[in-house]
Amino acid sequence: AGAKPLAGRKAIVTSGPTHEPIDPVRYIANRSSGKQGHAIAAALARLGADVTLVCGPVAIPDPAGVQLVRVERAAEMRDAVVAALPADVAVMVAAVADWRVASAAGNKIKKRPGEAPPPLQLAENPDILKTIGHHASRPKLVIGFAAETENVAENGRAKLERKGADYIVANDVSPATGIMGGDRNRVKLIARDGIEEWPEMGKDDVADKLAALIAAKLLS
Ligand code: C5P
């Protein structure tokens, strides 16, 4: 139980990777587990928010108390997020594939003996965070994530401006950290007026801390 400071408020969260088809049986993907995004959706729901979670293909349980929209490709994720507007807050946590295969094959690409491998022509995917950050129905609060390993403050600030976000949550995803796919996270919260380093904690605790910040900002 406890207070429901976000009762009556609408939140949109993205989570997980996207899968970009090569043909009907093959795809390009990444190692995002969806754990952090799902935890944030659940934390916002616990504070009473009406949460739409748009998530790519993940192998973790559905969070309680949210409206789930399952998608596969970045273009589908963008459409689902835009369809969920208006909202008070958007938290874009998904590891959206930067590129898709320009024209995915309608049938399975055959491997023929003696033939060269097929070239993969890539096209740029829509930037969902940027779309929402500059949308006519922009939520009051727009939050993005950034997988950074160096120049976190500089890169984060630049990303904040470019994407029209209020906050960027930056984390180090180099393999040695075990963050990607793991249960713990260490993040830096980048705002226009400064940067805050959070100590390492569980992804659920990062989610609760971020949800509390969102509640404080929306109610101020
Ligand atoms: O530019 P970069 O991929 O580092 O930005 C990461 C942030 O932007 C994350 O919040 C991610 O969810 C969002 N993003 C997005 N659509 C993309 C690429 C990134 O929403 N195509």
Image: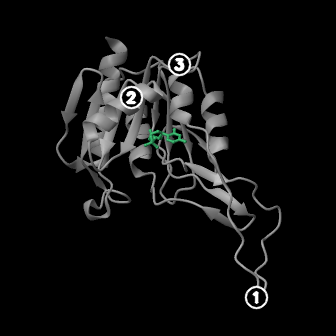
> Does dot 1 land on a helix, a strand or a loop?
loop
- The residues tagged by marks 1 and 2 sit, at their Cα atoms, a distance apart of 49 Å
Q: Name the residue located 75 percent from the left edge and 81 percent from the top edge.
A: 111
N-terminal label among 3 and 2: 3
Specify the amino acid type for callout 1.
Gly
Observer-side mark, 3 or 2, equals 2
Observer-side mark, 1 or 3, equals 1
Residue under circle 2?
160
Residue 29 placement, left or right of 154: right
On the question of residue 209 being in view, the answer is no
Which quadrant: the N terminus?
top left
Residue 80 location (% of width, % of height): 64, 36
Residue under circle 1?
114
Residue 164 location (% of width, % of height): 45, 24
Q: Quadrant of residue 192?
A: top left
What scheme was used to colour the molecule?
Answer: one colour
Specify the farthest residue to the bottom: 113
- In the rendered view, would you say 44 is above or below 101? above
Q: Residues within 10 Å of mark 3 (few under 14, many from 20)?
A: many
- The residues tagged by marks 1 and 3 sit, at their Cα atoms, a distance apart of 53 Å
Q: Name the residue located 59 percent from the left edge and 15 percent from the top edge.
A: 136
Q: Quadrant of residue 49?
A: top left
Specify the amino acid type for callout 3.
Arg
Q: In this orientation, which residue lies closer to the viewer: 43 or 136?
A: 136
Residue under circle 3?
138
* Discs 3, 2 touching: Cβ within 8 Å: no
